[in-house]
Image (cartoon, grey):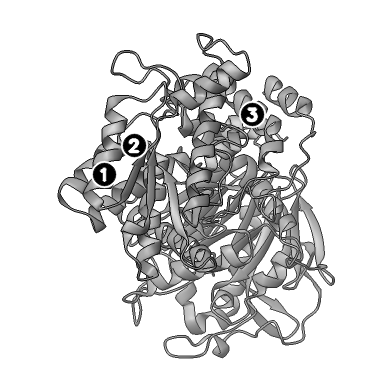
Amino acid sequence: MGHNYGFIKTAAAVPFSSIGGVSQNCEIIAGQINEASDNGASIVVFPEMSVSGYTCNDLFQHETIISKCEEGLSGILSSTRKLPILAMVGLPVINGSNLYNCACVINMGRILGIVPKSFIPGYREFYEPRWFSGSRSDYMPEIELCGQRVPFGTRILFCDENERNHAVAVEICEDLWVPVPPSCGHALAGATVICNLSASNALIAKHEYRRDLVNAQSARCICGYVYCSSGTGESTTDVVFDGDAAIAENGTVLAESERFLRKSQVIYSEIDVDRLAGERIKMNSFEGTGSGYVRTGFTGQGKSFSLTRVIDPMPFVPKDRDRLDERCGEIFRIQASGLARRLESVPGARPVIGVSGGLDSTLALLVSIRALGMLDRLQSDIIAVTMPGFGTTEGTYKNATLLCKNLGIDLREVDIKNLSGEVFTACGIDDKNHDVTYENVQARARTYVLMTIANRSNGLVIGTGDLSEIALGWNTYNGDHMSMYNVNSGIPKTLVKFLIKRVAEHEFEGDAAKILSGIAEQPITPELLPPDGKNISQKTEEIIGPYRLHDFFLYYFVRFGFSPDKIFFLSKAAFRVEYDEKTLKRWLAVFLERFFKNQWKRDCVPAGVKVGSIDLSPRGSWRMPAEASLRDYLDILERA
């Protein structure tokens, strides 16, 4: 793994430019390139026509502007010749008998390529065909500029010599707005970062639409996208420019400029090109050959830097309350829809659920209520079974019974202590030894009871185990591991309580809502060990570690296939305030060990509902050999 774990620092620079003031503009540009390089950026993107100013209009056809632009570019090359940064500046360039709106790509005093704008807008407030030719016109594939012979064309890839997954391509303003942007071809040819030099004026609601375009294109192309538009120094004769700049990665905006700022500014963020390359490998529909492209190398930053982008410590839980509410509502509908269809396939089938008063079983109960509602059936068709054992506490028992009674659920109670005791006696087990066997006997007793009741009642046992438990193997094989349909199999533990809270707020009131809110705040426990007085003695997170960490590790390990050292690197950025490095490494090792050693349990999990991009069903979402070696993974983590 590289020194920055596949992250490339990028920058978008908006100069406070002067219209036609080429010398002044070039001084500002050179200064911003130096600033970006000093801050560790490997790429810096400037606006369209940043050397001359976009609103020069008929002055573009004057020899003075054209010659001054080349002279100014020579000055930029000279003052940045020692900088390991790829810079893209905009200027008018003559090729043959035509003038082109171009991006000049420079690095270490060299011009690596000139990319002309493909689509020239000539509608509404745009008059570019008056001055510029489009890329479909005939042009020479090489020209001389600033005393250098350089490639000229739209199909050029700029490849970082320090990072194998880092290839850069360019499109200009209008190119993004057309039905098939050039960046689609660039991405298929291998570009992981697309840079757009733009001059897009400010109009009501245009900023939001622009951002949607940037986001959508970065997602469609599975790429990083650096967008930079002209600032407030442009002419306001007919339009105003707002200096809109953004850095996006695969559908997520990482950084944005302050619009309408009346001074120069540079924004930064890091694009994870390894993650992008990994995503493309997984998608066998992402096919391209890159034929017809010219590839040229550049020298990027070869030093480490600190991340400025935010690494969310809870990737499954949106920070924004409205988005979280919307996400939870959608997940709940998916869960209920899946269960409704399964119940429909067995005429008259009744959901049978073991209720403990804990988080997972409560969520399964709520999903069952909604599913029956979709089928125009009464929630009294649900058979809820509370099964007190040696670890059951008064608080959770009351939660389960009061909730079911309040909702009119068919509640049955089966004490499993005697059944478990008979197993202890028959197998010669000392019930004073509270080991794993002691716990598993109770878990299997509960499943035995549920299956028996379902058998007598034309029922389907509804599984309650969540995604996090399945990942860690925190379940008893052929105990809570087994059901006839698991509605929680795609729900990470960190999201469960938010789902319950959301349902409580939107669909219940009075006592039921209060009970649900109380359940959402319960500590996580299987309640298989005797309580400490009236208090829960067995708290899962004290044994296997915080679910906040495990869900974080799960997200990056399964969703993106990151190596242990990169996950450790990200966890340090996400949890720097809460956990020290030793603690993070310890629990990451626990996650890896449990994830690998419990694949055999996942090989035969029951059918369940997939709700997000991460799922561990062996029938399509996650396949790995149960005998896979863990050694190399732990070695990598140890060296991190």
Q: Is residue 331 above or below residue 541?
A: below
Question: Where is the C terminus found, in terms of image quarters?
Answer: top right
Q: Look at mark 2 in the image and give the residue it sits on.
A: 357
Label 1 sits on a secondary structure element that is: helix
Residue 604 visible in the shown view: yes
| Residue at 49% from the left image edge and 51% from the top image edge | 456
Q: Look at mark 3 in the image and give the residue it sits on.
A: 594
Specify the amino acid type for callout 3.
Arg
Nearest the camera: 444 or 505?
444
Mark-to-mark CA distance, 2 and 3: 26 Å
Q: Earlier in the sequence, mark 1 or mark 3?
A: 1
Image x and y of residue 569, in percent? 59, 31
Specify the amino acid type for callout 2.
Gly
Label 3 sits on a secondary structure element that is: helix
| Residue at 47% from the left image edge and 32% from the top image edge | 547
Nearest the camera: 635 or 493?
493
Mark-to-mark CA distance, 1 and 2: 8 Å
Label at residue 56: none
Q: Earlier in the sequence, mark 2 or mark 3?
A: 2
Q: Crowding near pointer 1: few (<14 within 10 Å), some, many (20+)?
A: many
Q: Earlier in the sequence, mark 1 or mark 2?
A: 2
Nearest the camera: 441 or 122?
441
Nearest the camera: 523 or 381?
381
The mark lying in front, picked from 2 and 3, is 2
| Horizontal arrangement in the rendering, residue 426 relative to residue 282 (left or right) | left
